[in-house]
Image: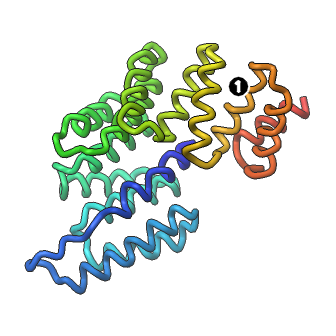
Amino acid sequence: MKKQVISCCLTALFLTACVDTSPTKDVTSAEKALTYFNMGVRYMDMGELKVAKDNLEKALDWDSSNPDIHNAVAALYEKIQEPEKARSHYQRALRLAPENPQTQNNYGRFLCETGSYAEGLQYLNVALNMPLNNRRWFALTNAGRCLIRQAQAQKPKAEAYFREALQLQPDYSPALLEMMKLTYNDGKYMSAKAFLQRYQSAAQATPDFLWYAMQIEEALDHKNLAEQYKASLLNDFPGSDEARRVKTAIND
């Protein structure tokens, strides 16, 4: 699931970035860095991690002072499970752009996903309260996830964050997925179904989504739909943890 979370935000967070081409910087170097940066992010989004790494390293060679490049490199190291290298690049991005809400958001999410919940929430709250943050739904959703990881007792506050994120961006799929999970786990199956349908209109299926969709339809006694989601999970994502859980249940 962690890799999916990183992946779903890459294009939105990184491809809209620009390189500083002020007179104090070599414009040619900045342009070359931007070219490699954009290619690296696209390859990372496609799952071509080796090619992405090659391009992002070249981007750093051309411009090591760009925080967006360090953000992307950090996300790559998360995906290849090298958290200390990811931490180093997130911290470098933060030093280079402390007033950038996305930099605060990215590092806060990373800290939460590596178990530093209190510290992660501090960075996410900074991002939430920055006047220039015009994408508060990112930090709201990440803060909600962090609260749930921290303690189940935090679920009401987490739900409030997810709902606020969806007020700001009604089709934001990560927040829709979290609300789908919360309402299903609370036994509110019709509400979960409504979030399921909204998610389907906003994003492509992931193993996590298909697993919960299958559970929701089974809870509603919609056997045919549950089987369809199960088939999609096994056929489209056979190597996923969720598919393995289905296969184990079948074998038992």
Above/below status of 207 relative to 68 = above
* Percent of width and height locating residue 251: 91, 34
Image quadrant in which you'd find residue 158: top left
Q: Name the colouring of the figure.
A: rainbow
* Percent of width and height locating residue 90: 31, 53
The residue drawn where x is 22% and y is 36% is 126
Above/below status of 158 relative to 24 = above
Looking at numbered disc 1 in the image, what kind of residue is underneath it?
A: Ile
Quick check: 166 left or right of 60?
A: right
The residue drawn where x is 64% and y is 19% is 190
Above/below status of 98 relative to 221 = below
Outermost residue to the right: 251
Q: Which residue is mark 1?
A: 216
Q: What secondary structure is marked by label 1?
A: helix
17 or 110, which is in the foreground? Answer: 17
The residue drawn where x is 60% and y is 27% is 194
Residue 111 shows in this picture: no
Residue 31 shows in this picture: yes
27 or 115, which is in the foreground? Answer: 27
170 or 113, which is in the foreground? Answer: 170
The residue drawn where x is 38% and y is 64% is 15
- Give the total of numbered labels: 1
- Label 1 Cα neighbours within 10 Å, binned few <14 / some 14-19 / many ≥20: many
Quick check: 150 left or right of 214?
A: left
* Percent of width and height locating residue 188: 61, 15
Q: Which quarter of the rendering shows the N terminus?
A: top right
Q: Which quarter of the rendering shows the C terminus?
A: top right
* Percent of width and height locating residue 119: 29, 33
